[in-house]
Image (cartoon, rainbow, N blue to C red):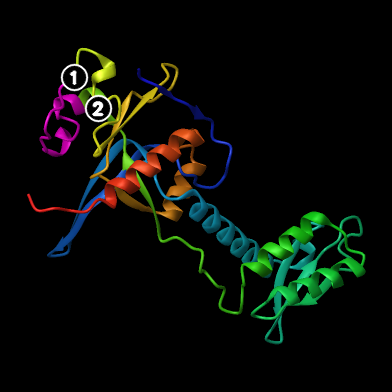
Amino acid sequence: MEQTVKTEGITEERICQGDIFKDVEFIEYATEKSGTVEISKIIFPFVIVLSQDCDLQQDFNARKCAHNVMFARNKPKSDLKQGTAYFYKKNEKWFFCLLPNGNGGKDAFYIEVRANENQRDLEEISNTYATAGKKNDEAKKQLLEIVTSNYDNKNNQDKYLISVIVTPLYNIEHVRLGEHLSGIDLKMSPISKSKNAASDALLQNQKPRYHYLKFANKEPIPDSVIDFKHYFSINVGILLSMKEKNYCIRRVSALYRERLSQRFANFLSRIGLPE
C-alpha cells in the first residue's frame, strides 16, 4: 500500500534537510570563446535538500553569529538596540559587550574575550557576567554562542558549508516513460507499472536507485521519484536567498526525510562490482 508523505510548512529561516525548492537552476557548464561567454543551465521544477540537518544547523548558526558580529562592529553604539550582545575590537583586543535594556545604552557591560576560549574561560566569563548583575538571558545565550564558535581575529569559519546537496524531484509519470530528462535530450530507461500497487517495486521503494514520494492531493507537488544517480550542489548563499524569496515551498516531515537520507547514503556507499 502506498503511503502519503507528510509535509510541513516553512517555519525556519535556515535551510533544512527535506526542504523542497521550486524552479532551481543547475549550471551545466560555462565556456568562453573570443570574448563570448556561453552558459548552459537546467531549471528543475522541484528539488529536495539532502545535506545532513546538523551540518545545516551549524552552518546557519556560525553565519548568523558572524553576521551579528560584523553588523555590530560597523555600527555606532547609539544605533544598536538595547539588550544587544556583540563583539568589538580595540587596541588589537576583542571584547564582548552588552547594552542593557532600559537605560538608553548607558552602563554597557564589557569583558575581554581571548582568541582561544576553553571551558574554564567560559565559566569565568559566565561568573563575571552574573556578578556584574547583567542577567539578560538572551544576551547570555548570545555570548555563549559567539564565544563557543571560537571567533578569533580571523573569524573562524570551521562550521561553514561550501554548498548544499540537493536532488531533483521527477514527476513519476515522466519517469515511467523514461522522459523526465527529455528537455535536455536525454532518454532514460522506462519503468513498467504493475497492475497491483503492492507489488510495484518502484512504488514500494524496492529499487535501490529510486525513491518514491507520494504527496497529498492538496500539495503543490506531483507524486515524484528521486533518482539517486542525479544530485548536485548549490551555493549556501544562493539557496538562502531563494528561501528568503519564498522559493522554498514545503518541508518533508522528519520520519520521511530520515528514510530518504538513509536510502541515499546506502546507495552511495554500495560496493561497485564489475559487470
Quarter of the figure with residue 19: top left
In this rendering, would 37 be left or right of 164?
Answer: left
Check whether the beta carbons of the residues at disc 2 and disc 1 lie within 8 A of each other: yes
Residue drawn 65% across and 61% down?
Answer: 68
The percent coordinates of residue 134 (x first, y second) are: 88, 63
Residue drawn 92% across and 65% down?
Answer: 133
- The foreground one among 217 and 191 is 191
Q: Is residue 262 above or below residue 89?
A: above
- Amino acid type, mark 2: Leu
Q: Is residue 75 above or below residue 208?
A: below
Say which element carries label 2: loop
The percent coordinates of residue 5 (x first, y second) are: 43, 26
The percent coordinates of residue 247 (x first, y second) are: 44, 37
Q: Is residue 247 above or below residue 196?
A: below
The magenta stretch is: 175-193
Q: Residues within 10 Å of mark 2 (few under 14, many from 20)?
A: many
- Amino acid type, mark 1: Lys
* Mark carried by residue 193: 1
The magenta stretch spans residue 190: yes
Residue drawn 70% across and 70% down?
Answer: 87
